[in-house]
Image (tube, rainbow, N blue to C red):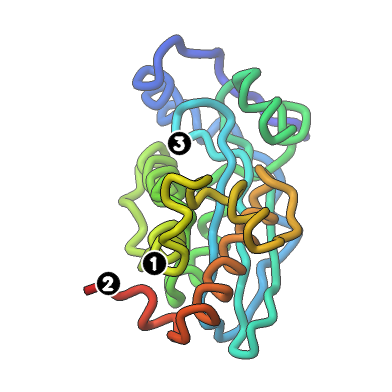
């Protein structure tokens, strides 16, 4: 059954307050796909959002890296229980029709929490952590106590020559590292972030645990 989301608010702060009130009325199907299971070296996480409000997560992607560096990718749509901005729809191609029967963020988090809580997470920039924390607060939850690292910082350490020369965003790293992925799909971007870390390990000759320590 399609979910019913409340009318649009004019400001992000009012939108978040409205979401907190109406979130429980906006419920979709329970997640049908199940996330990977295992003891992974790390998990890269990426989100897409419906609008400029960081809490408006409409897709979550995971890239789970096995000890032999194989990557299992998982993604799920999320009903953000808010309206979509046209800019965001153009960016990732996800709109209201795609999330009409998708689970809410709190429903997705319940499924993912056991996996994410026991692994180190990688995000490409700090936005994904901010979005997860903001969405959690929308549903009256504390920010999850996840362990996060930033693959942008890892990339800057591995390829300092890219600073001022295209930068360390996924778009430029795609060209530099010859990565094959569809940008602004959460599962694809998560896989790309994981691959950036694997390339950095090879380039610097350092394991993941050393890469995530602050550079001296």
Residue drawn at (43%, 20%) of the image: 15
The residue labelled by disc 3 is: 55
Circle number at residue 45: none
The residue labelled by disc 2 is: 215
Q: Mark 1 or mark 2: which comes first in sequence?
A: 1
Q: Is residue 210 above or below residue 60?
A: below
Where's residue 34, x and y in %?
Answer: 70, 66
Distance (Cα) linking label 1 and label 3: 30 Å
Q: Mark 3 or mark 2: which comes first in sequence?
A: 3
Q: Is any atom of residue 157 visible in this view?
A: yes
Please, what secondary structure does the residue beneath circle 3 have?
loop
Q: Is residue 175 left or right of residue 168?
A: right
Distance (Cα) linking label 1 and label 2: 8 Å
Residue drawn at (64%, 90%) of the image: 68
Please, what secondary structure does the residue beneath circle 1 have?
helix
Give residue 101's quadrant in the image.
top right
Circle number at residue 157: 1
Residue drawn at (36%, 73%) of the image: 212
Q: Is residue 179 above or below residue 158?
A: above
Q: Nearer the viewer, residue 99 or 69?
A: 69
Pointer 2 local density, CA inside 10 Å: few below 14, some 14–19, many at least 20: few
Pointer 3 local density, CA inside 10 Å: few below 14, some 14–19, many at least 20: many
Where's residue 194, x and y in %?
Answer: 58, 68
- Residue farthest to the bottom? 68
Q: Is residue 63 left or right of residue 133?
A: right
Q: Pointers 1 and 2 in contact (CB under 8 A)? A: yes
């Amino acid at each position: 059954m399609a979910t019913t989301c409340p009318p649009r608010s004019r400001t992000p702060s009012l939108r978040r307050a409205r979401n907190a009130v109406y979130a429980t009325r906006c419920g979709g199907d329970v997640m049908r796909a199940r996330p990977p299971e295992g003891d992974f070296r790390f998990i890269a996480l990426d989100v897409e959002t419906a609008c400029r409000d960081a809490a408006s997560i409409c897709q979550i992607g995971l890239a789970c890296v096995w000890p032999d560096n194989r990557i299992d990718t998982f993604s799920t749509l999320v009903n953000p229980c808010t309206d979509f901005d046209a800019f965001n729809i153009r960016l990732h191609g996800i709109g209201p029709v795609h999330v009409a029967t998708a689970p809410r963020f709190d429903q997705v988090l319940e499924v993912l929490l056991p996996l994410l809580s026991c692994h180190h997470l990688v995000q490409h920039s700090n936005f994904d952590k901010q979005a997860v924390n903001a969405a959690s607060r929308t549903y009256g939850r504390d920010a999850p106590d996840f362990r996060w690292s930033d693959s942008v910082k890892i990339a800057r350490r591995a390829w300092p020559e890219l600073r001022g020369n295209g930068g360390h965003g996924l778009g430029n790293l795609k060209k530099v590292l010859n990565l094959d992925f569809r940008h602004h799909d959460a599962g694809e971007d998560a896989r790309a972030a994981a691959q950036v870390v694997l390339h950095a390990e090879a380039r610097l000759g350092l394991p993941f645990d050393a890469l995530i320590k602050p550079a001296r």
